Amino acid sequence: MRIDYIVCPDNIADKLAVKHHVTVREARQVLLSKPRIRFAEQGHTEGNDVYAVFGQTFAGLYVVVFFVYKPETATAIIISARDMSAKERRAYGRK
């Protein structure tokens, strides 16, 4: 999967900061740092599938980012991001 553009709507950016204590900058860093990507769920409309990305920020924080991928423009639209759970961190470290 090739990602050329990363988009985060303002309302999502606010939610990430307030609810999950993750900045848009950290979410972008995870997407750019050779993360592990997995299919999360099929979107409500065709071509809007949701993916989960597991990775680290440049500061070493473990973060999971959920995004919708638009293959025609190679764009990732961030819909959520949060710190990895302990279980996710263990699985991430094993691979």
Image: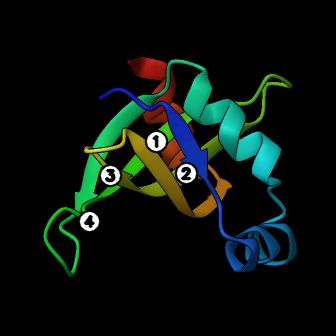
**94 shown above or below 78:** above
Comparing labels 1 and 3, the label whose residue is closer to the camera: 3
Identify which residue is drawn at 66% across, 58% down: 82
Going by the numbered disc 3, the residue's amino acid type is Lys
In the picture of the structure, the residue carrying the numbered disc 3 is: 70
**Residue that sits furthest to the left in the current view:** 46
Q: Earlier in the sequence, mark 2 or mark 4?
A: 4
Q: Which residue lies furthest to the front in this view?
A: 73
The kind of residue on which mark 1 rests is: Val
Do the numbered discs 4 and 1 sit on residues whose CB atoms are within 8 Å?
Answer: no
Residues under numbered marks 1 and 2 in contact, where contact means CB atoms less than 8 Å apart: yes
The residue that label 4 is drawn on is: 48
- Determine contact: label 3, label 4, CB under 8 Å: yes
Q: The residue under label 2 is which amino acid type?
A: Val
* Residue 1 place in picture, x, y as percent: 29, 29
Give the alpha-carbon distance from disc 3 to disc 4, as whole Å: 7 Å
| Residue that badge 2 annotates | 65
Q: Which amino acid does label 4 sit on?
A: Asn
Q: Residues within 10 Å of mark 3 (few under 14, many from 20)?
A: some
Q: Mark 1 points at which residue?
A: 53
- Quarter residue 13 falls in: bottom right
Q: Position of residue 44 (x, y in %)?
A: 21, 81
Residue 46 sits in which quadrant?
Answer: bottom left
Direction from residue 85 to residue 16 in the image, left or right:
right
- Alpha carbon separation for disc pair 3 and 2: 16 Å
Q: Say which residue appears at 26% left-offset and 65% top-offset.
A: 48
